[in-house]
Amino acid sequence: MEIIKNTVLEGKHGKPILLDVFYNKNGHPKPIVIFCHGYKGFKDWGAWDLMAKAFAKQGFFFIKFNFSHNGGTVAQPIDFPDLEAFGNNNYTKELDDLATVIDWCAIQEDYKEEVNLEDISLIGHSRGGGIVCIKAEEDNRVTKVISLAGVSDFKRRTATTGDLENWKKTGVKYVLNGRTKQQMPHFYQFYEDFIAHEERLTIKRAVENLQKPFSIIHGDADTSVLIQEAYDLHSWNKNSELKIIKNANHVFEAKHPWEEKTMPLALEEVVTYCVDFLSE
């Protein structure tokens, strides 16, 4: 298996995008799967590497990446050394980053014999689920999309709610990262950007208009993004598939760091279902 870590792409907003690829090199074009991490997430979190290897073993060209403003750096892609970048992140930048990754698939030379540009699927975890729903609806290059414990409404999220008057006055609000104990900043620009692009950033609108295969996967023990959001997504698109993973939490029983050599059973179930859906 070929594993190439931390390829640097030039982002559109002054920060680089770090990207990993996993595939079996055989000269045959493979379906592309692009994975988007969630809020306070990163491409190397927990068991995501094991998930990437599992997809590659099943014949996919698997890509995962760090959003340019997720708080990681080229030197330290894990966790959040660049809180200034984190504070300047927003949904529009993440959509632009995903577009950059899709563009890269089409123009890169190193893997041109290994990728099928007519078969590009997106998987988004948590906040990334909303990002991939919007991108799949607006980008004809995307053929299938999976929301993995994905959110259904950006307007209700932490980054776009709260004491708006005080937020505007101070220019910043903070959210505690329970794992790293960092106070994660959100600059007021996040709210301004959301309001300026609210129609585009409405996940319901995107899902209702989505005209390609769409799967929703959610754990029924998820306390971070409640399962009702999966039911909402499913209700907005009658052609979607809904898969409930019993007793699974928001990260499908993984954690960071993940030191086991195999994925947790819930995440194995997720991968099996994704492979079947993407192979149809």
Image: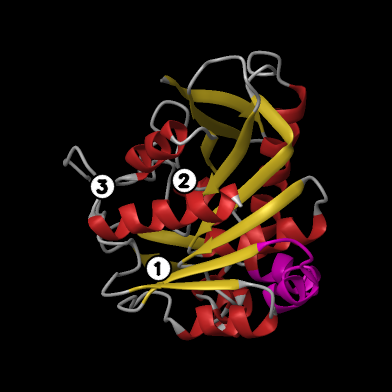
Q: Inspect the magenta stretch and tell me whether residue 198 lies in it.
A: yes
Residue at the spot x=63%, y=27% of the render? 9
What's the colour scheme?
A: secondary structure
Residue drawn at (50%, 75%) of the image: 158
Query: 171 above or below 23?
Result: below
The spot of residue 211 in percent (x, y) is 79, 65
**Is residue 12 visible in the rendered structure shown here?**
no
Between marks 1 and 3, how big is the CA–CA gap?
29 Å
Identify whether 126 is placed above or below 259: below
Determine the image quadrant of residue 224. Answer: bottom left
- Per the rendering, the mark at residue 263 is 3
Tell me the residue that label 1 is attached to.
Answer: 175
Which residue range is magenta in the image?
Answer: 191-213
Q: Amino acid at mark 2?
A: Gly
Tell me: residue 79, above or below residue 160. above
Q: Position of residue 274 (x, y in %)?
A: 49, 54
Q: Residues within 10 Å of mark 2 (few under 14, many from 20)?
A: many
